[in-house]
Amino acid sequence: MMIKEFIIDFIRLFFPVTCSVCHKNLSKNEGVLCSSCYFNMPRTRFHNDENNAVCQLFWGRVKIEKATALFYYFKHSKYQSLIHQLKYKGKTDVGQELGKMLGGELLRSGFLKDIDVLVPVPLHPKKEKKRGYNQSFYICKGISEVSGIPIDSNTLVRNVYTETQTKRNRNDRYCNVKDAFSNKHSENFSSKHILLIDDVVTTGATLESCSNKILEIANSKVSIASLAVASN
Ligand SMILES: [Zn+2]
């Protein structure tokens, strides 16, 4: 046995690392999910379907080249806790590992073949300061790690404070985020195909607003990939 593996085993004996979904202890070959939760994840398998439910959210609203998500976000599903840990519990490693899973699937499906840059949906600076990080940036990190596609988190920025959206309907939400974004260095996105990255797609209002802002830049194209898509 390699010394490094021995040390990992030794540490895990006292500080077990547990599956982020079912909380069983993980073996040293498992990352954030145990093999059972990994295989049973409710994957969408949307990547090659141009009429999928994420694409349909944007029909008639904004021109998106391709859109997809890794898994379904069902209310009260045990997989819901992954997003909760990523957004509210500081578990950035969950975002990065799931980003690697998403990136691997996108790479194998050919989804990434003409993508130039990964862009995390920006948080309002106040919110990011409070949380300490932008969860979507860690999803980008995972995708970038497996694909080699660079991340740009400085060009698209968020500029007005929008209050919490949970009680708002789609139109209210859209108005609320319509002017929330700006392009700081537009030239970075000129003639580029941008892949916007989010944690959960619900109504698509925020992504629609980001996309409209990016599409103001000459010859830019936008696609969307999210960890999860809300489903009833
Ligand atoms: Zn598990």
Image (cartoon, helix red, strand yellow):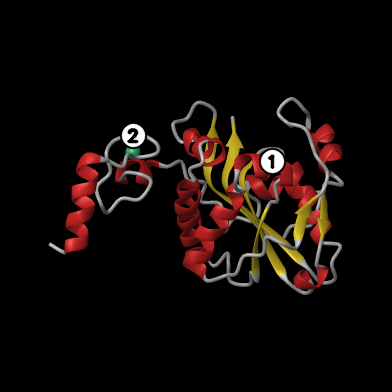
Q: Which quarter of the rendered picture does the N terminus lie within? A: bottom left
Mark 2 residue CB less than 8 A from any atom of ligand 1:
yes
Q: Secondary structure at mark 1?
A: helix
Q: Residue at x 81, y 73 (%)?
A: 187
Residue 23: which numbered mark, if any? 2
Residue that badge 1 annotates: 127
Q: Residue at x 48, y 34 (%)?
A: 81
What is the count of numbered marks?
A: 2
Give percent across and percent down for residue 216: 86, 62
Give percent across and percent down for residue 69: 57, 49
Q: Which quarter of the rendered picture does the C terminus lie within? A: top right
Between discs 2 and 1, the one toward the N terminus: 2
Give percent across and percent down for residue 150: 60, 69
Look at label 1 and name its amino acid: Lys
Residue 4 location, quadrant = bottom left
Splitting the image into four quadrants, where does ligand 1 fall? top left
Q: Is residue 226 visible?
A: no
Residue 7: which numbered mark, if any? none
Other-residue count near label 1 (Cα within 10 Å), few / some / many at <14 / 14–19 / ≥20: few
Residue 20 location, quadrant = top left
Q: Name above or below for residue 168 compared with residue 206.
A: above
Q: Residue at x 54, y 67 (%)?
A: 110
Q: Secondary structure at mark 2?
A: loop
Give percent across and percent down for residue 109: 51, 64
Q: Residue at x 65, y 68 (%)?
A: 117
